[in-house]
Amino acid sequence: MKYLVSTLLILSVIQAVHSQNNVCFTIETNPTSAPGFGVFTKYVDVFGCGIYAESSVSDEKVLHAAAVWAELIDNDENGIVDDPAILNELLLHEAMMPVFESDGNAAMNTFFTNYTGDGVSAVLWQSEIDPSQTGHWGADATVEEILHTINHVGHTNVYSSAFDLTPNSSLLSEAMDTARGGQWLSIPSPYPTNAWYHYDDFSCDYECMAIEYMYWMIVTNMGILDDAATCAGIANEWEPCSPALLQSMDLLGYGLITDSTYKLPQNAPDGNYCPTGLIIKEQKNNLITVFPNPANNTITITRSAPSVQTLWIKNSVGQIVKTIKLINSSEQININGLKSGVYFFDLNQTKKKLIVN
């Protein structure tokens, strides 16, 4: 199913403050009944993308993953995604981040035995999430795994001439071949002395190497790796651990990830996401619900404080596709004329997403 999204989407969330971090999202029950998804009990909607987690994963860590995802696609944190084309691609593939208690546990096995989509490019385990050390190498893998997903599902498809992962296909593959000292389709032993990217995991093929290379460049440019202990710890795989070293050593790669055409994130996430002035809270004295959602033919909207109001349903580019006058506390609305996709409606300063099958 093809999902679309408004480029001017403003999050509709309830503020949740956890320990040191300020995260304006709310954890919901798992809304997905597809095969394999029953292992998840927690869900966070991040601009239409999903963070799914087992019940044993703490709320703090689930919200941390949501905040990092939001910071990576809304890097200036103004409540609007930086690149609508990337978000559209993520939604098209139903991109998500599954969070499991541990590697290879029963829930993880059940999910991947049943999952048939193409929106999962990485996973997180509870033990590798640390909200107090966002993105820190060896402590918090959240930035890495979520970047892998956004880059792999989003950038490689939207900007294939820049980020395609196969040999001789893109600016990324050209830059990586230079960084590895040659076009190695398998791991050389050893790498040439002039290589500064020498990943040595034999289970990682050329495309895997390319997505890892993209990650290393982005977080290096963010300054996440720029301390002596981290530089020493990753030197066997990646040498230019500071922005200055990246710029001087990897001219092709640095030029690619800083090219404003692609709107890659430049600022390091810190696990805090709550854009000032753009968070719209649902008012308890006028709760609005819509069901079923996803829907096929009709939806029912209920309001706890009914009055005569106008409801506008908008499509992916913010165009009004349906206007409805609401009078009663419960109204049934025919949506037969809407094509499959994701829509949004505003009512009483509450913004809601509607999925039409």
Image (tube, rainbow, N blue to C red):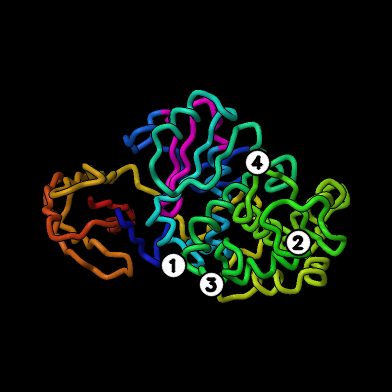
Amino acid type for the residue under numbered disc 3: Ser
Query: Which badge, 3 or 4, is on the more N-terminal residue?
Result: 4
Amino acid type for the residue under numbered disc 4: Pro
Badge nearest the viewer, 1 or 4: 1
Query: Which badge, 1 or 3, is on the more N-terminal residue?
Result: 1
Query: Which badge, 2 or 3, is on the more N-terminal residue?
Result: 3
Write down the residue under mark 1. 85
Write down the residue under mark 3. 161
Confirm or deny contact between disc 1 and disc 3 (CB under 8 A): no
Give coordinates of residue 303: x percent, y percent: 21, 45
Amino acid type for the residue under numbered disc 1: Ala
Query: How far apart are the alpha carbons under marks 4 and 2?
Result: 33 Å
Give the secondary structure at mark 1.
helix
Query: Which badge, 1 or 4, is on the more N-terminal residue?
Result: 1
Write down the residue under mark 4. 131
Q: Which residues are magenta?
A: 39-61
